[in-house]
């Protein structure tokens, strides 16, 4: 027996959630959601001043710029925590706030660099 699945059943849900995985942290920044591109203004509002936990510390995100081109979304942010860091993220065009936050947290946890350019489009 087949059940008809409407598009709204998928909006905002990751592939992991659809197949029953409950470990959401595994999917942050993994670009597995069915997407529509959030506007740069919406993304700015979702990221500006947001607090994240990474590398055993709390970090406040300050957004310096968001630029979209035909295939990528570039987000330049500053992080304020026990130290200050800056990062320029190169994300797929349809990236949203969850993708940016997951990418930032991953970079903070894996790097001690004060400044970096992180190309998330090339990660597997």
Image (spheres, rainbow, N blue to C red):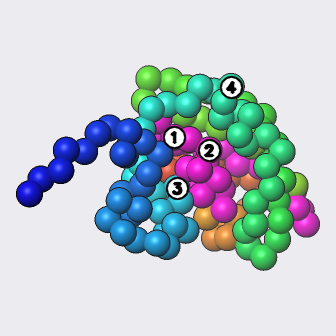
Q: Considering only order in the chain, which callout, 3 or 1, is on the residue closer to the N terminus?
A: 3
- Residue shown at 42% from the left, 42% from the top: 11
* Residue 75 in sight from this viewpoint: yes
Q: Are marks 1 and 3 in contact (CB under 8 Å)?
A: no
Q: Considering only order in the chain, which callout, 4 or 2, is on the residue closer to the N terminus?
A: 4
Task: Give the Cα distance between marks 1 and 3.
Answer: 9 Å
Residue 73: x, y in percent?
Answer: 54, 33
Residue 102 vertical position relative to residue 12 in the rendered view, above or below = below
- Residue shown at 51% from the left, 40% from the top: 95
Q: Where does label 3 land, which residue?
A: 29
- Residue shown at 55% from the left, 31% from the top: 38
Q: Where does label 2 land, which residue?
A: 97
Residue 33: x, y in percent?
Answer: 41, 48
Classify 10 Å Cα crowding around label 2: few (below 14), some (14-19), many (20 and above): some
The secondary structure type at the circle numbered 1 is: loop
Classify 10 Å Cα crowding around label 4: few (below 14), some (14-19), many (20 and above): few
The C terminus - image quarter: bottom left
Q: Where does label 1 land, which residue?
A: 95
Task: Give the Cα distance between marks 4 and 3.
Answer: 20 Å
Residue 57 vertical position relative to residue 34 in the rendered view, above or below = below
Looking at the image, which residue sits at the far bottom?
A: 56
> Within the image, what quadrant is residue 107 found in?
bottom right
């Amino acid at each position: 027996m087949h059940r008809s699945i409407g598009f709204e059943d998928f909006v905002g849900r990751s592939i992991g959630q659809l197949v029953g995985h409950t470990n959401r942290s595994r999917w942050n920044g993994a670009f597995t959601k069915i997407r529509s591109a959030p506007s740069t203004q919406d993304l700015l509002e979702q990221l500006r001043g947001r607090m994240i936990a990474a590398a055993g510390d709390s970090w406040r995100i300050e957004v310096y710029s968001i630029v979209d081109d035909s295939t990528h979304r570039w987000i330049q942010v500053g992080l304020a925590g026990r130290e200050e860091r800056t990062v320029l993220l190169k994300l797929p065009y349809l990236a949203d706030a969850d993708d940016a936050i997951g990418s930032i947290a991953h970079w903070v946890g894996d790097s001690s660099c004060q400044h970096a350019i992180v190309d998330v489009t090339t990660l597997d």
